[in-house]
Image (spheres, rainbow, N blue to C red):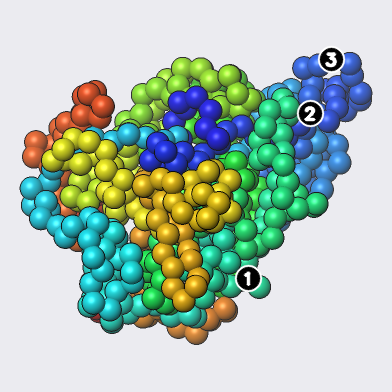
Amino acid sequence: MERGNRRRGGVAVVAALAVAGSVAGVAPVGVLAAGGGTAGSADATYRNYMVFYADGARSQAVSDVERAGGTNVSPGDPRLGYVVARGPGDRFLEALASSDAVVGVSSNRKIGTAVATRVAPEVDKDLAARAPLDGAAAEGAEPLSGRQWDMRLIGATPDKSYKKAPGSKKVLVGIIDTGVDGTHPDIAPNFDRALSRNFVTDKPKDPNGETFDGPCEVTSCKDPVDADDNGHGTHVASTIGSPINGLGVAGVAPNVTLVNLRAGQDSGLFFLKPSMDALTYAADNGIDVVNMSYYVDPWLFNCTANPSDSKAEQMEQRGIITGMQRALDYARKRGVTLISAIGNGSTDLGKPKTDTSSPDYPQGEERTRKVNNSCLNVPAESKGVISVSSVGPNGVKAYYSDYGIEQTDLSAPGGDEFNPSTRRSDVTRTILAAAPEKLLRTQGLIDKDGEPKSSAVVRDCKDGTCAYYQYLQGTSMAAPHAAGVAAILVSRFGQPGKGGLTLDPKTVQRLLYASATEKKCPSPRAHVYRATGAKTVHVCEGGKSRNGFYGHGIVNAAKAATIKR
């Protein structure tokens, strides 16, 4: 569960359904002196590290690692240019800071999801006239489609994109997340269990003895590839590709194949190495599109030379930037289109000033530090990644959504629970998608007879089969809409390749931008939000064709289904 009020990127959930957690890392396993010998000082905590080396400098990097006290050096992953070694904590990192062969070092740190965020009621007059948020299903639509304002907003409906381009089974969409409930009745028809992988092992407690993932569900603590004990990944997968099967909802691309590439813990956190492993696996196994609704911790902003950080902290942040970029590059060069949530910090990522939530591991070590535009939110600001901001039912950028003229590539429905007319919270203004029944029972959101106990949970049944859905909001919910539209484009224009169809990510990106509905900045550009009585001003920069709130525009499935290459 959530701890405190620390800001994270990815998912902002309705308060009744907060699902994010916090804190993970590598437990100390011993101490090592600077020269490699055993020492009794507690400041030389012996940990596992990924040491990223410069091109052609592996041998020199290994020598420098050993001189810095590193032991048990193993090959790591030559595809991404790193070796794995054990070293004496900060002393190890500081020693490697002077090595020309080493470009970054990272322990097995985490990637996080978001704290629940309240958002403000704002009206965009030119988009205010919308179909009811909670109405009856249209003819030929799924039973709960009346609740899917998000799909209507982007033209993912039976009379538009579903009719012309519902996607192809040959297109593989990877969900790098907390897992996917592949047994869910509204996901199972499109779920590829054989291709799915789980790259994490559940951790019942953190190094300080605090509950982390909780008790393991299986003896090995490694969940099966069709499980999701968090719910975040299942929601994302459903938005991308729930099938048209007469039950519940349909996703943006209801005919594509969904692949679970689990890199997140049950707690909702992700470690760096599993995320890198998920990306390289996607690259090597013909995955066409991946959705990443997270950012790399323990640093909200990763700075390579921030004077307020120690040398060890600088090296760690360099490692995060370098490691993720190499994994992303590896995947993109092999045909994987990379989609990311931009984050829920309500921040102009081009003009960050302070970071009050880092480092957020171990818990309680956060401090206020000054940051600037040289510091990166990863992977949202990594090269080759399409970053997506969030809009509500009226098409206005949500209050919680990060933004920035350099950072925002597209926008998509992510939800805004505040009703602009009543100025009260309305759960139907958020995003409805599949939820694991087991999780809802654990959370006490359905009773012993299967009846929902919260307005944020919906049940739908067909021929004796029942499925559950929940309302969530955040840029985590916006990104999968873009991933679904990308899958439509690969389905239409892809050529035979490994795993099915393939399309150059540069082409997918160009067509995503060309098919988006352009949206200009608000007038005045200094847009005022009022969330729970507080006043916040976000300034939108740029023109109609590209700006900091909406990027190239709001994704449009209907246009993607008809656009010419």
Q: How dense is the environment of label 1, judged by Cα within 10 Å: few (below 14), some, or many (20 and up)?
A: some
Label 3: element kind? loop
Q: How dense is the environment of label 2, judged by Cα within 10 Å: few (below 14), some, or many (20 and up)?
A: some
The answer to which quarter of the image holds residue 15 is top left
Label 2: element kind? loop
Viewer-proximal residue among 345 and 124: 124
- In the shown orientation, is residue 253 left or right of residue 422? right
Residue bearing mark 3: 41
- In the shown orientation, is residue 125 left or right of residue 331? left
Q: Nearer the viewer, mark 2 or mark 1?
A: 1
The answer to which quarter of the image holds residue 386 is bottom left
Residue lying furthest right: 38
As drawn, the label of residue 193 is 1
Label 1: element kind? loop
Vertical placement of 308 versus 439: above or below?
above
Q: Where is residue 94 in the image (x, y as percent from the top left)?
A: 69, 24
